[in-house]
Image: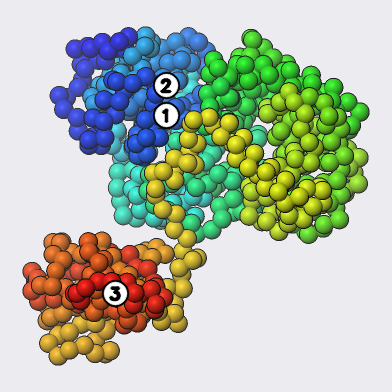
Amino acid sequence: MREKIGKITLDYKHYPGEDFYCDGDVEDELLEIVKSHSEEEFWKIIEEQAKWPVLYHLSPLRENIVDWIPMEKDAKVLEIGSGCGAITGKLAQKAGSVTCIELSKKRSLINAYRHQDCDNVTIHVGNFQDIEPELPGDFDFICFIGVFEYGQSYIGSENPYVDWLRMMHGHLKEGGRIVIAIENKLGLKYFAGCMEDHLGTYFSGIEDYAEGGGVRTFVRGRLEQMLVESGLREYSFYYPYPDYKFMSAVYSDERLPKPGELYDNLRNFDRDRMLLFDEKRAFDGIIKDGLFPVFSNSYAVVTGPEIEIKYAKYSNDRAQEYAIRTELGIIEGRPVIRKWALSQAAKEHIREMGKACVDLTKRYEGSGLEINKCHIFQDGAWAECEYIPGVTLEEIMDFFLEKEDWNSFYGLFDEYMKRTARGEELPVADYDLIFANILVSLPEEATIEDVEAVKASPWTVIDYEWTFGKAMGAKEIAYRALYCYVLEDEKRKKLDLAQMARRLGMTEKEAEDCVSREMDFQKFVTGSHKALGEMREAIGNKVMEPEQWLHKFDGSVQEERVQVYMDRGHGYSEEDSLFVKDAYAGENRVMLSLEVERDVKILRIDPAMDYCIVKIEKLMFNGIPVEDGRKNIAVNGKRLGNGSYVFATKDPNINIKVDRLNMGEKNRLEMEMEIIRLTEGIAVDMAGAVKKWF
């Protein structure tokens, strides 16, 4: 049986008649969205709803993971586990035909409605093992995007991952490729405090999935072993950053990240996370030690001969008229930088780069500041720029800043000012003339430590995307460069921006105005579109920093200890009490799971040893909610309502009458509270405003 939705074909020959997995009501919501709205409207809906599933399934940024891979226009692609179609549309745009396999009919309908204008997509709905034998053997690409980790569910064998690869190898044409995008079991984000993506628990992959489960991610070495065992001996590894789901850059072994590049690491759109250390600094050290391939958060594996692309960076989390991709490729044996328009509207932006190249070259002629050559092709579809070897001025300035060699640092900044101020009265200015956009080409024998060699070397502006046809003061552009420099890295805060402003001859008001204009510029770039960082904040998942509340585990901080007393019919005593050392799950959040012996009559919980407000968010005994009220709970504070109490005492306590509850031989009380400490005056005033004690 087949169904047509627009131009897309759905094949139900192997559909069992019901969906065996579902994300619940959100899938109905997604289906309604794609039926009623065009893809151009998705971002507005994503922003309005501020929900992880809507962002995850509908964001066009999901397509980045396959967008950079070169495909012939007549390529034949198989997408396994196509879901709601996050990448199907991009594959259909790049290739000649796309065959999808998806177990869920609901998800297949979402995919079909959102891409109903694609006449080259067929979706096979049903169990993979039923559909696979009927697949042809001439695919150019077979894509496992966020799917390979479910191999145990797809292939019921003792060695499912190798068997799956071997099976799909048989469906490739000669020279065809398999593409795998998957999380790294040892991705740095997991060490830094992100929960495992699939299980939602801390350190699951790092602990080798000790608790079991049907999902497995892998380190690079294990993936390589499986590829070789399956007969796929030719392959390349790529490193999507921050991860493959919302990739903003992809690196390769030929172009690994450089220190300072990996700074966008707070990406917990789906759930809360801890922040155990500064991931940017950790990445910088890992990169310097040559270990980035071990700790990359995700892998993208492409089998077959090496492809020409070695690096790609996406600038499409912004207004569509400025959405571009920058890539480094090896074309006919030489490195080439290309910038691609990712929308029709962005072609004008690419064309403007060609004009900027000409205008800036004239402005800076004779200044010692070179402009990277740029040539425009196909009326702005893409631009080709020279590949210039060298070290960024940012990296050199970091070196001297870290050493606190201020003479060298200021000397380089003065050299920057001398070169960039040339022609400031002319009606052309590169607003984004930051240190990272200037490449210093040192002589072969020189190092970045030789500040005089750095000053004497050619400096080249390698990115001038934000060039405007008007004059701008050199000191404003320089102050913005300093502001962005400090903003991107905590360790740069030792640089005194106020002092640098004075060095530039700027007043405090001028510096403030410059920062204000920078905020306006960022809004100009993103337009009405909310960037991913803003979406993370809107969704509202927490980033918990244990360093800020580790002292709560220290018995020396009396005020913040949680103590539990057991009354077995003879009152409370210190001897029959305990301190719960693992109570804090966040800065102000306490989570308790206490075993209660059968002879306990009342369980007293002292949430702190200080004036405080406590909100009981969860209270269960043997899995049954405990009703809030005097019948079951007594406190020495005043009730504010909805489970909240204010305690105008340094000995707050919550007494739970467990003997009135459903007691058994083994009992467990679970409690979650939010606790905020108060000053004595505020606590007394708040308690005084409540008429009755509870």
Gap in angstroms between the C-alphas marked 3 and 2: 53 Å
Q: Nearer the viewer, mark 3 or mark 2?
A: 3
Residue 21 placed where, x, y %? 22, 35
Residue 666 placed where, x, y %? 14, 71
Q: Residues within 10 Å of mark 1 (few under 14, many from 20)?
A: some
Question: Quarter of the image containing the C terminus?
Answer: bottom left
Labels 3 & 1 near each other (Cβ < 8 A): no
Vertical placement of residue 183 versus 382, above or below? below
Labels 3 & 2 near each other (Cβ < 8 A): no
State whether residue 387 appears in this view.
no
The dot on residue 687 is: 3
Occupied quadrant, residue 359: top right
Q: How many marks?
A: 3
Vertical placement of residue 663 versus 475, above or below? below
Question: Does residue 114 appear to the left or right of 654 in the view shown?
Answer: right
In this figure, which residue is indicated by the disc labeled 1?
43
Residue 310 placed where, x, y %? 62, 29
Question: Does residue 585 appear to the left or right of 105 in the view shown?
Answer: right
Gap in angstroms between the C-alphas marked 3 and 1: 46 Å
Occupied quadrant, residue 523: top right
Labels 1 & 2 near each other (Cβ < 8 A): yes
In this figure, which residue is indicated by the disc labeled 2?
40
Query: The residue tagged with tag 2: helix, strand or loop?
Result: helix
**Foreground residue, 356 or 671?**
356
Residue placed at 60% from the left, 16% from the top? 347
Residue placed at 47% from the left, 41% from the top? 534
Question: Quarter of the image containing the N terminus?
Answer: top left
